[in-house]
Amino acid sequence: MKLNFKKIIINSILIFIVCSIFHFIYDLIPSFLTAIFFPVNESIWEHLKLIFTSCVFYTLISNLYYKDKNVFLLGYLRGMLTIIILLILYLPLRKLFGEIIYITLSILFISILISEIIVNKILKKHYNNLNIISVFLIIINFIIFTYLTYNPIKDFLFYDTESNKYGIDILNK
């Protein structure tokens, strides 16, 4: 079966748009619930949470149209692959050039695109057990994201260079 590049491009663009919208949700509606799913600061860690949330959300919503048999596995793999690819591409460039928003956004889109190609290549049949396990993995990921939002590690991944703080703002007062 050949890859459907039109579907891959459309999905990549839509996930990128969802990421762009979700970036501002916590600022608009600051609460414990929005802190679970959306970035509470400008740290790398919080943007990884944003990517994961966007991929899972997009997969669940697009499933109304696509009717994927592996919806949870697809959402989990989209999120995790995009995060892994982004970190591989982004961290070395950030170390060399610092934070340049156009480069960062380009790397995000490229990471989403590569992830889409990979998941469309490997998810050709129904994986019922992996799909069920993925529900739990998604929940575990959000538990980890939430815990580390409120209890950040003193590491560069958790450091918000704009506010010079770690974690959610209520911890820094």
Image: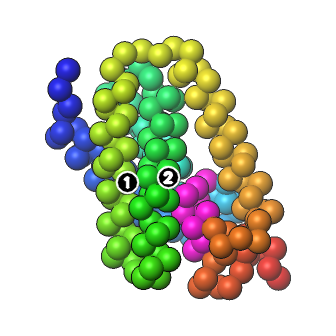
Measuring from the top left, give residue 9's x and y in whole percent: 22, 46
- Magenta residues (range): 37-49
Marks 1 and 2 close (CB-CB < 8 Å): yes
The amino acid type, in three-letter code, at marker 1 is Ser
- Determine the residue positioned at 70% across, 39% down: 140
What amino acid does circle 2 point to? Ile
Quadrant holding the N terminus: top left
Considering the numbered disc 2 on the image, is that residue within a helix, a strand or a loop?
helix
Res 88 visible: yes
Q: Which percent across, then down, holds residue 84?
A: 49, 51
| Disc assigned to residue 126 | none
- Decide: is 78 above or below 64: below
Residue labelled with disc 2: 83
Tell me the residue that label 1 is attached to: 111
**Quadrant occupied by the C terminus:** bottom right
Per the model, the C-alpha gap separating discs 1 and 2 is: 8 Å
- Colour convention: rainbow
